[in-house]
Amino acid sequence: ETGVTQSPTHLIKTRGQQVTLRCSSQSGHNTVSWYQQALGQGPQFIFQYYREEENGRGNFPPRFSGLQFPNYSSELNVNALELDDSALYLCASSSGLEYYEQYFGPGTRLTVT
Amino acid sequence: AQKITQTQPGMFVQEKEAVTLDCTYDTSDPSYGLFWYKQPSSGEMIFLIYQGSYDQQNATEGRYSLNFQKARKSANLVISASQLGDSAMYFCAIHRGGSEKLVFGKGTKLTVNP
């Protein structure tokens, strides 16, 4: 196990609703990245938080937003859910920007109906 | 922009044999890193191996080795002595130096047969 935890494990929401996903980073890690993995695809970068500040963003609309707390845990918020938002959402933590030590959590599987 | 291509949607191998999973990449940056991750059906991405663009030696981690051919822009993963537990999706990814993100390929599903 990597020490990165995510909650909830599974979630079912209705189109138009809002959802919050949570990630607790590995001890000592101050960077959290979020990825969306649609069925049959590789993960796509959503955004990254480094020491509580957004440090980069992928090609996702503003209804995808995030937050990082002083203990470096993080939230991913998605507003106005669409059917295409159904995916596995992965968070990954690392110490600084050392990507070869980036560890992923088990993911949250979101289904939008 | 960086791009990863994995041309093998699925691969089959007999237990105890070696298998090579292909990965080619495209980047114009001189500094980058290449990664392989394993994703079992449980969903968690498990880091396997890393190769930096300036590393002279091919990376090895236990039964995993990375066949890095910089001129051909390929970074194939070799798994020796396959085990049933190696059955999973395998993703190749690239990270550009100074960038904040990993770019992943579409993955290869490996099935190890007894």
Image (spheres, coloured by chain):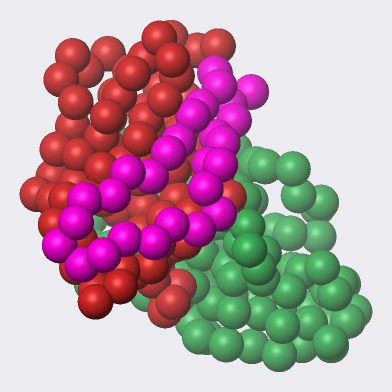
Chain colours: A green, B red
Indicate whether residue A21 is drawn in magenta.
Answer: no
Indicate whether residue B26 is drawn in magenta.
Answer: yes
Residue at the (56%, 42%) spot, across then down:
B7
Q: Which residues are magenta?
A: B1-27
Residue at the (28%, 49%) spot, across then down:
B19
- Residue B41 drawn above or below residue A71: below
Dividing the image into 4 quarters, which one contains the C terminus of chain B? bottom left
Q: Position of residue A34 (x, y in %)?
A: 54, 56
Residue at the (52%, 48%) spot, across then down:
B8
Report the side of B90 relative to B29 (left or right): left
Depth check: B99 or A55 in front?
B99
Is residue B21 visible in this depiction of the protein? yes
Depth check: B105 or B11 in front?
B11
Depth check: B24 or B36 in front?
B24
Quarter-of-image position of residue B57: top left
Depth check: A36 or B112 in front?
B112
- Residue B75 drawn above or below residue A6: above
Q: Position of residue A43 (x, y in %)?
A: 57, 54
